Image (cartoon, helix red, strand yellow):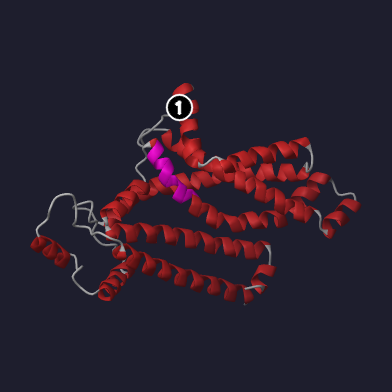
Amino acid sequence: METARYILSRFGQSLFALLCIITLTFFLARLAPGGPFLDEKAVPEHLIEQMNKNYGFDKDLHIQYFLYLGRLIQGDLGPSLGNKGFSVNEVIAEGFPVSFMLGIVGLIIALLIGVPVGVFAAAKRNTAIDYTLMAIAMLGICLPTFVIAPLLGELLALNLGLFDVALWENSSAWFLGALTLGLYYSAYIARLTRGSMLDVLHQDFIRTAKAKGVAPMKVLFKHAFRGGITPVVAYLGPALAGLIGGSFVVETVFGLPGLGQHFIKAATNRDYWLINGTVTVFAVLILVMNFFVDVVQAWLDPRTRSRN
């Protein structure tokens, strides 16, 4: 009963957060200077009025908002003002798989590298191995993705010829993009894993297990790992948000046709529907990820349910 109440509470909070994000995005986009029908060329005033009427921009802002919510509930994100003849649903359906794949593969790479490095560093704490691994992790944190991406492209693509340097179809450049994101976030995960593992390894039940003669590796992975990995699980939601947001930069460097370029063009051209649709899709993805992270964290640490 307590678990069901906790899950329902988290679900309700996620829906409320999504509504807040949609609302803020809608009004902030329209309060920004400029408009979707203003460009370098002079457009007659009567044509602008006609286009505003065709898209419903002549109505009061609150009416536009409720009309947009009505379409959104039906799954209609509206027409793309900057991509003539295409709806926002079609634009997102084309670009989202690229950004999503980069984020998910990048997250997998980050976990496969960061968690073992953090656990190993905690097991060898205050040794040369520990100091070396954490120094490398700190270096990874200090280097942003727009620095790592060109370096990997130069080394692995241009010099060694292991990957393509750009494009998407029939190309391996997407893996360089995912690797860039994975290496960057693996540094955070490694340091987070090390810190949480050290906290668990200093607790009384670990000392008791060692006193009973339990093998060090068994103590590390059977007794300490579950508690030590809990903060990492909690970090997965924000990490996915950062990975997908960071994919915008990586997509530009490697010429990948993800949502990053569409979002930048939409913001520049005041493509209101595409701005709203892109932010909404990413918000849903991140909130769903955070929701599952909360559920898994509650399973790993039952005390979490009692604190919420």
**In the picture shown, does residue 13 fall above or below 181?**
below
Q: Quadrant of residue 226?
A: bottom right
Q: Quadrant of residue 127?
A: top right
**Magenta residues, dominant SS class:** helix
Q: Is residue 251 within the magenta segment?
A: yes
The image shows residue 60 at horizontal and vertical percentages of 23, 75
**In the picture shown, does residue 163 fall above or below 112?**
above
The residue pinned by badge 1 equals 157
**In the picture shown, does residue 76 fall above or below 160?**
below
The image shows residue 180 at horizontal and vertical percentages of 50, 39
Q: How many numbered dots are placed on residues in this image?
A: 1
Q: Residue at 76%, 51% (x, y): give it.
A: 198
Give the crowd class for mark 1: few <14, some 14-19, many >=20 residues within 10 Å: some
The image shows residue 21 at horizontal and vertical percentages of 41, 66
Side of 43 where 297 appears, left or right? right
Can residue 107 be seen here? The reply is yes
At mark 1, the secondary structure is helix
Q: Residue at 79%, 48% (x, y): give it.
A: 218
Q: Quadrant of residue 49?
A: bottom left
Q: Quadrant of the N terminus?
A: bottom right
Which stretch did the figure color magenta? Answer: 243-253
Q: Is residue 44 within the magenta segment?
A: no
The image shows residue 50 at horizontal and vertical percentages of 11, 64
Give the amino acid type for the residue marked by disc 1 in the picture. Ala
Residue situated in front as seen by the camera: 94 or 118? 118
Can residue 109 be seen here? The reply is no
